[in-house]
Amino acid sequence: MKKTLLALAFFSLGITTYAQSDFNKWSLEAGYGFNKSMGPLTQGYYSPTLNLGHGELGLRYMLNSKYGVKGKFGFGSFSEVKDKSPEFNSNYINVSFEGVVNLARVLNFESFSNKLGLLGYFGPGFGYLKQDTRPIGDFDPDYVYSINTGVSLLYKLSDRISLTGNTSLIVNGRQRYTFDGNDFISPGRPDAPEIPYVHATGTWWSGTIGLNVYLGKADEHADWFIEEDKYVTKDELAMQINGIKDMLKDSDGDGIPDYLDKEANTPVGARVNTSGQTLDSDGDGTPDHLDECPFVPGPASSKGCPIKETVQQVDYFKEAINEGYVNVYYAFDSSKPLAYSASAADYVANFLKKNPGVSVEIKGYADELGSEDYNIQLSEKRAKAVYDLLIATGIDASRLSFKGYGEDTSVDKSSADARQMARRVSFEVK
């Protein structure tokens, strides 16, 4: 028996500790206490209710916080009630492999205590029973199989150790002799020494007090791990919604939320870029919303227009348009122009009114997200929306055409800002 105990101890120490980010899974268990051989016993033989002499060693692995597996090694001896029964001594070993249920988590013990735990066990085993006082048959041990079940009550001492009280019920199969060894179990005892293995049973129980030692690098073991609630409360949801509302606040009304706006006090009506900064398309120092010639540089004294000649305005405008300086932008998956860029359509309308011999093609684009067919349809809807805006200002439909070109392949697809620039309508002067 000593060799067996040493082998199990070295095996347990040699197991590699496994730690999961949430909780530890391995534990070593040891306990010592009482046993009782319930029966069968030879007539006139009795065993004490609490016979001190049972030990256990176990190695347990939890698959999750509720279920696991366990290997257990039990050993000890049965003896008689002093002064009431003839003497006998029966040594035994029992090895079992059991499924484990963490009943504390299943029954929500955490609702009233975070120190108490309860585990349930059930599984098969095998072992032997050797009666030293056996007067009949051979003297080889009874080699038996067993069905094992039990419960353990845990008390948490620390994150690494818990005190445990364990009670187990074991039913032996193929037990030939009574627990005291003085009688053969099956009726019609055969002649010694040929005592065959029979499908008879013996029942006994054990109770121990011991320790669980938890292995691993996480803060706590599966025995005590309580998974966080997967569902947010109403208060948490309200807090998240309020946070989103704060993020989407647009204090200066330029269409860019404050958390993205690099110019928090944009003047009313100003055209801005995707960072909320006022645009000056021609770089003449007069912002577009104050510049009567936003794509032709000119001094502020002439409201941003050239002082000498305006004959070349068509050429400047055509160059600015065809090089992509005038655009109407859209939010993701939307065909409604963003407020800060809708004024570009007004500039095109004003130019067409001043230059009746000019016509314009309206070109719609989308970013790379979505299928090709969908992007074609979306870009055409965007172009049609601007076409309708220009018609509404009084521009003759014969001077306008529109087309959706789908994905704009000229932008950097990995950049969110570039994708925003791709969601646009551009113009081409004919």
Image: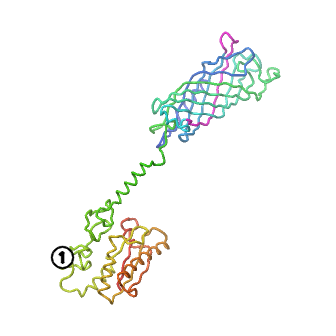
Rendered view: 106 above or below 182: below
Label 1 sits on a secondary structure element that is: helix
Q: x, y (%) of residue 328? A: 35, 74
Q: Quadrant of residue 102?
A: top right
Residue at 46%, 29% in the rendered image: 157
Where does the N terminus fall, quadrant-wise? top right
Q: Along the line of sight, which residue is nearer the eye, 105 or 220? A: 105
Where does the C terminus fall, quadrant-wise? bottom left
Residue 101 magenta-drawn?
yes
Rendered view: 18 above or below 6: below
In the image as oriented, which residue stretches furthest toward the bottom? 357
Residue at 21%, 74% in the rendered image: 286
Residue at 47%, 68% in the rendered image: 370
Q: For the residue carrying disc 1, how many other residues have a C-alpha within 10 Å: few (<14), some (14-19), or many (20+)?
A: some
Q: x, y (%) of residue 361? A: 39, 83
Q: Which residues are magenta?
A: 80-103
In the image, 294: left or right of 55? left
Residue at the spot of label 1? 300
Q: x, y (%) of residue 106? A: 56, 38
Residue 353 magenta-drawn?
no
Q: Quadrant of residue 4?
A: top right
Rendered view: 5 above or below 397: above
Residue at 59%, 35% in the rendered image: 70
In the image, 326: left or right of 148? left
Report the colour scheme: rainbow
- The disc labelled 1 sits on which kind of residue? Ala
Q: Along the line of sight, which residue is nearer the eye, 338 or 313? A: 338
In the image as oriented, which residue stretches furthest toward the left? 301
